[in-house]
Amino acid sequence: TSKATLAPATGASTVATTLDAGTTSVRARAGGIQATAALVVNPPPPVLTRVDLAPLSSAVIVGQTGQLTARAFDQFNQPFASATFSFKSDDANVARIESATSSGDGSAVATVSGRGAGTAHVIATATSGAIVVTSNTTTITVNPSPPVLSRIVVTPASVTIAAGETQQFAARGFDQNGQEINGTSFAWASSSQAVATISQSGLATGAGAGATQITASSGNISSAPATLNVTAPPVATAGQIVINEALVSFATSTTQARADFLELFNTTGQTLDMSGLIISFRASGNTSAVSVVTLPGAVGSRTTLIAPHGYFLIVNGASTFGVAADNDASASGFDLNNSSGAIKLELGGVKLDGLRYQQNGSAVPPAAFDNFGEGTLFTFAGGTPNDLIRNPNATDTNNNATDFRRNGTTASVSPKAANP
């Protein structure tokens, strides 16, 4: 009775109603005589009933592809092999169906490509004759392509500096979509080290006259070259280089590593050429003669340079107070007069600066030094050391009396550094 029922139960005939696939026996009896027959119940033919699309959601990157699988089932939840499939995206500008392949086992695979960042929805449709069944909806998220360094831009594109000066370059990296990539590290290069060097922070320093190409690179990507033109440093003129400190004597009890020195300062923001600079001075002792030290190189030869806002140290020896000399003038006897003297800077016949000084109680410098100083004679109380410094550092009003003071503390003598 689980396979079929009979109605009516009596009479010359009956009708069998099938319930489940299988085989059952049907028996008829009249009086003492009976007979049986076999009733075979076949299952109903499969009917397309359901389509599943998986995965329910997925993500791809623009320009890449992913796959979706559709499976058809009949009313018995068995694969429905004879279905034909199609797929549809609701936004082909975001996700496009590139191909669909049926496997013959009731499934099909669709290839979906990411076309643009955003979200699209895809459904699958299975067809069997007049029966059309639509799947669930799957969501495709298309993400933009990860940034890939494609271009480097260096600024400024072209600039001119003087030798010895610096120029900061900057680099910016951009991806394939023209968006800037932050945090990129760059390697810097100069095509001519003789013209300019460049640090790995992008700071170029002019070395010699000419032009060089500055590039920034990261990985296998290099920028278009920026042009750095380097001009010869100008020859210093009046007021551009000043006497900033002069140690004319120090206590004899101190170490002999402390020699007389003259500290020059570049008041400008550019490198200056002071080749052939003549330093005239009154030497130690009771003398009216003018002594001279000349810095190396002919005027304008770029042999001796002083950096922007930089110091240059001329010493009666190789060093003083532990600081190396930029020019060792000991061969010229650079021993400055400790009580009454004068110092003058001249370059190419132009007076750049001068200092005329007198310790209280001493005679004024001899007449040969009358035109050495600027403004009023600088006078100071005696003692050792006699370290004559501009106060404040590097200030020049062209008046020795107000521009200088005596620093009498050995511990605060600071060659090639700002005055205390």
Image (cartoon, rainbow, N blue to C red):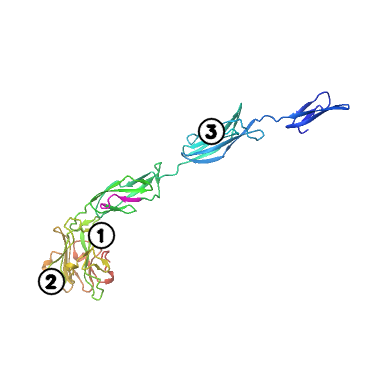
Q: Residues within 10 Å of mark 1 (few under 14, many from 20)?
A: some
Mark 2 residue crowding within 10 angstroms, few (<14) / some (14–19) / many (20+): few
Residue 119 picture location, percent across and down: 50, 38
Please give the label number shown on residue 207: none
Question: Could you tell me the amino acid type at mark 1?
Answer: Gly
197 and 40: which one is in front?
40
Residue 234 position in % (x across, y down): 20, 54
Counting labels gives 3
Q: Position of residue 43 (x, y in %)?
A: 70, 31
Which residue is disc 2 drawn over?
287
Instruction: Identify the image quadrant of the N terminus.
Output: top right
Query: What SS does tag 2 mark?
Result: loop
**Mark with earlier residue (3, 1):** 3
Q: Report if the CB atoms under discs 3 and 2 are less than 8 Å apart.
A: no
Report how far apart the C-alphas of labels 1 and 2 lie in the structure.
33 Å
Tag 3: residue type? Ala
Q: Is residue 375 visible?
A: no
Instruction: Magenta stretch: give its range.
Output: 187-195
- 332 up-or-down from 165: above or below: below
Residue 16 seen in render: yes
- Please tell me whether residue 193 belongs to the stretch shown in magenta: yes
Pick the residue in front: 297 or 37: 37
Where is mark 1, residue-wise?
310
Residue on which the image places disc 3? 100
Work out whether mark 3 precedes mark 2 in sequence or the reverse, and give the earlier one.
3
Instruction: Point out residue 317 in the picture as x, y percentages from the top left corner.
Output: 22, 68
Q: Residue at x 77, y 27 (%)?
A: 16
In which quarter of the view is residue 330 placed? bottom left
